[in-house]
Image (cartoon, helix red, strand yellow):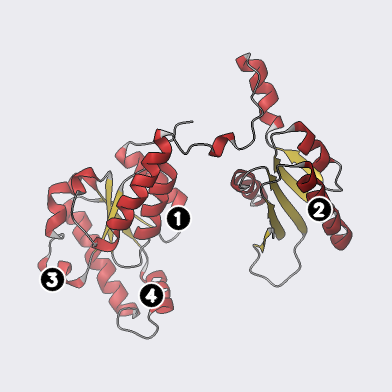
Amino acid sequence: MPNEQDLSKSSAKAARTVFFVSDGTGITAETFGHSVLTQFELRFRQIRLPFIDTLDKAHSAVREINHAFEKDGKRPIIFSTLVKADLSAVIRQSKGMHMDLIQTFVDPLEQELGVKSTHTIGRSHNITDSDAYKNRIEAINFSLAHDDGQSDKNLASADVILVGVSRSGKTPTSLYLAMQYGIKAANYPLIPEDFERGKLPSGLLPFKKKIFGLSITPDRLAEVRNERRPGSKYAALENCRYEINEAEKMMQREGIRWTSSTAKSIEEIATMILQEIKSDRRVF
């Protein structure tokens, strides 16, 4: 089954259907397509068609695209990362507006580099034996083992240690850093006992240079916590104000670099952290 979503929060009909067609996962086409589509204040029904790696699958994709055309009365938009020319040629026969993200860049690069591309399907994901893949797996395991202050063992191996009040975005940021960059990220919650002592958790003190803080506005924190524990003291706005105020004062006092996660995506937060720790481990 294709992965279908309508990113609009409104019940209004989507303006156009968009397909992300790929011989692999479709993540690259979808990521690029989203970046382009966000420039338009329209609603799009978005469908991912991954693993289109045979002619039969390509023809099946064309039938689905053409069905969307007949249903909507408008040309579907297609973001394609198909490597094989014969598969791409089939998709081009559909009744959609076709944008080939591979060919757009491969041809100019072949001329610039003086080398022909391999046109190998799935090459970007064929990394099972690479050091980068192994580093990511190791980083993910590290982040899971050091999530929410579960352990203070091997913190010397951490690339960064995230601190902040509960539900300020530490866990998703840690996992994103691990999965995308192979960064070993531990995270620790700052709790009322820490504020009463006026000190960071003792296990973190030897690694203060590795610490990066996350904060959040009280209103947003209360909203997030109420989804988890509705009506509790933990989620009460006044308690959220107290915890955030104390956490920010502690981070300022300890000289910890920090940012608010309220209006930032995980990608933006991760990029800020990478700049602070001077690390970008993506290698192609």
User: Disc 2 versus disc 4: distance between alpha carbons?
Assistant: 42 Å
Residue type indicated by callout 2: Ile
User: Disc 4 versus disc 3: distance between alpha carbons?
Assistant: 22 Å
Residue type indicated by callout 4: Arg
Name the residue that disc number 2 marks.
65
Percent x, y of residue 140: 36, 50
Give the quadrant of the N terminus. Answer: bottom right
The residue positioned farthest toward the bottom in the image shown: 231
The residue positioned farthest toward the top in the image shown: 114
Percent x, y of residue 44: 71, 58
Q: Quadrant of residue 7?
A: bottom right
Q: Quadrant of residue 193?
A: bottom left
User: Disc 2 versus disc 3: distance between alpha carbons?
Assistant: 61 Å
Q: Is residue 246 left or right of residue 284?
A: left
Q: Residues within 10 Å of mark 3 (few under 14, many from 20)?
A: few
Classify mark 4: helix, strand or loop: helix
Residue type indicated by callout 3: Glu
**Circle number at residue 196:** 3
User: Disc 4 versus disc 1: distance between alpha carbons?
Assistant: 18 Å
Q: Earlier in the sequence, mark 4 or mark 3?
A: 3
Q: Earlier in the sequence, mark 2 or mark 4?
A: 2
